Amino acid sequence: MIICAGNNETFSFAQPTGVGLIETAMNLTRLCLFDKPEFLLFVGSAGSYGTHKIFDIIESKTASNIELSFLSGDSYTPLDNVITTNTTNKKETIVNSSNYISTCQELSSKFLNFGVGIENMEFFAVLKIAQEFDIPAGGVFCITNYTNKNAHEDFLENHEKAKELLSRHVQNRIKELTSK
């Protein structure tokens, strides 16, 4: 099953699940309860903490849920805040998820120290639900912006092209897999 956030980030080949961690968790749980998929593939946009460039396509099976306040030493969590469905131990980009978009480049670049390279609001919830239902899962992301003061404007400017690039990438990957 291919899924996406929804609202203005939809794809003809993907089922929308909602924007942010909570909507995604609720709606994806419902989907999995009624018709458990064999695999979950999340498709969406992402912001870069600095190493990935605009319009880069990133594939990942690892997500974190780390808030900016953790990076400045102003919070902690007793919860496991990194989850992966990666069984190959191949090093990959970790996708951070929060219900907030980072706009402070100085602070958000500290994510790189933890191996976290990009942010997407929904992916941690996707992997958490996949783990709960024992479903293999992954994500494909296109970078629309850097996590700086221009994040929202850059997202708006680059979003349509990113969706086109994601659509093409996913359709090519499906062709690759079905021709084997």
Image (cartoon, grey):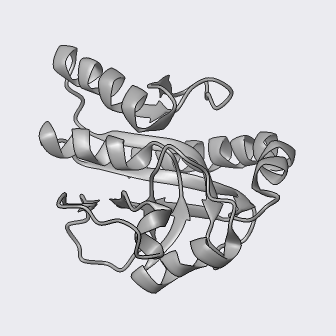
Q: Identify the residue shown where x is 33% and y is 39%.
A: 40
The quadrant in which residue 2 appears is top left
Residue nearest the observer in this picture, 44 or 66: 66
How far across and how far down the image is residue 106, in percent? 66, 78
Residue nearest the observer in this picture, 103 or 41: 103
Q: Is residue 174 left or right of residue 7?
A: left
How far across and how far down the image is residue 151, in percent? 76, 56
How far across and how far down the image is residue 166, in percent? 64, 47
Q: Residue extending furthest front?
A: 74
Q: How many marks can you see?
A: 0
Residue 144 in the image: above or below residue 112? above
Q: Identify the residue shown where x is 53% and y is 80%.
A: 110
How far across and how far down the image is residue 76, in percent? 29, 66
Q: Residue extending furthest top?
A: 34
**Residue 63 visible in the current orientation:** yes
Residue nearest the observer in this picture, 51 or 90: 51
Q: Identify the residue shown where x is 64% and y is 55%.
A: 142
Q: Identify the residue shown where x is 67% and y is 65%.
A: 56
* Image quarter hosting the N terminus: top left
**Residue 1 visible in the current orientation:** no
Q: Is residue 141 left or right of residue 88?
A: right
